[in-house]
Amino acid sequence: MPKFYRKKEEKIINSKATPRVWILVGSEENWKTALQDSIWGVRKNLKNLWDKIEKGDILVFYVSRPVSGVIGFGTVETKFKQNVPLWKDEIRVNKVIYPFRFEFRVDYALPLNEWRNKQISVRDLHIPTRAGINSLPSKEKFVNLMKKSEEQWNFSYKEMILKEEKKLEKSISKLTHKELQEMFKEIGLVQRFIAEIEYPMENEKLDVVWRRVEKSVPTYVFEVQLGGDVYHALGKLKHARDMWNSNLFLITEKEQIEEVQNLLDGTFHEIKNEVHLITIEEAKELYQSKNKVIELEKKLGIIEE
């Protein structure tokens, strides 16, 4: 698998499409204080979990017996450590029991007088409810919890999660100048060319070139232009054509095509029929198609791993 493809795949796997979900478990007494002050805290032995909590993570409010159910949801705001007693069990002994704390925003919470008859039972979902804080890595369990919440309370994080996923998808799909250079370098290597990035041409550098043999001049020249100075990019391509009679390619965004065409009709009319325009979408399609062929050839034993 080409290096660039692996990097993009790792980016998708490691990225946070949806926030982490945490189950906060405590007594009725402590939850009254927590909701009043919008603060939760954990004991020292749970610091390793507290360290992993981030702003924006989703919180599930679970009250232990006799309520034994979920009474609301929130999101993490700010983490902090405190040495001042807050909850009643701390005040009774005048000692901090839960030093590792965080503020949260309440997104939904049942009124106190409805905790015992409108709470959400999670027994059938097998969600961890040990005292303090529990991680909920299972997306399936969270989805099932959201279904119950929608049915019973008409509340869900569905819209927020979809929005985050779309935002992430957009950020991942938007390729940078450097990533496009890497893509076309790798395509060139697959095509059995000597492919190089930032190839020197007098006082300039070309984004990507493909050469047939070590001492030959560039057969293919690629310039990547995402916004900015299209004139300069076309100028470099024209110079490459004049020097080496190279095949010319400009990789750009759809929005810039009209500007490029106007320049090719005017100032750069000499290379109008020589410059091949490639949109970002076409570049991605080409790269993905090449990867599929490579993977299939490896699977069939046509090429070695």
Image (tube, rainbow, N blue to C red):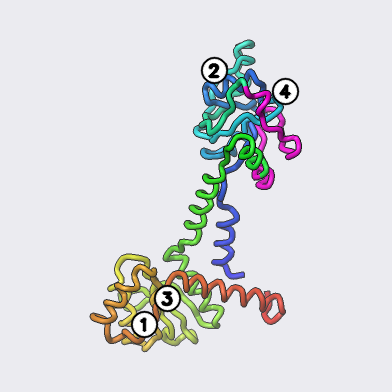
**Residue 63, located in which quarter of the rendered image?**
top right
Q: CA distance from mark 4 to mark 1?
A: 73 Å
**Do the numbered discs 3 and 4 sit on residues whose CB atoms are within 8 Å?**
no
Foreground: disc 4 or disc 1: 4
SS at circle 2: loop
- Quarter of the image with the C terminus is bottom right
Tell me the distance, in whole angstroms, between the alpha carbons under discs 1 and 3: 10 Å
Disc number placed over residue 278 in the picture, else none: 3
Whole-angstrom CA distance, mark 3 to mark 4, is 63 Å
Give 109 or 238, whichever is nearer the viewer: 109
Q: Position of residue 275 (x, y in %)?
A: 36, 82
- Helix, strand or loop at label 4? It is loop
Dot 4 amino acid type? Arg
Q: Of the residues tagged 2 and 1, which is closer to the observer?
A: 1
Disc on the earlier residue, 2 or 1? 2
For label 2, the crowd category at 10 Å Cα-Cα, with few meaning under 14, some 14 to 19 and many 20 or more, is some
Which mark is on residue 4? none
Magenta stretch holds residue 118: yes
* 4 or 1: tag closer to the N-terminus: 4
Residue 65, disc: 4
Span shown in magenta: 114-143
For the point 52% across and 76% down, the residue is 187
- Amino acid on which disc 1 is placed: Val
Residue highlighted by disc 1:
275
Instruction: Quarter of the image for the N terminus: give it.
Output: bottom right
Q: Who comes first in sequence, dot 3 or dot 2?
A: 2
The residue at the point 53 percent across, 52 percent down is 165
Q: Earlier in the sequence, mark 2 or mark 4?
A: 4
Q: Which mark is residue 84?
A: 2
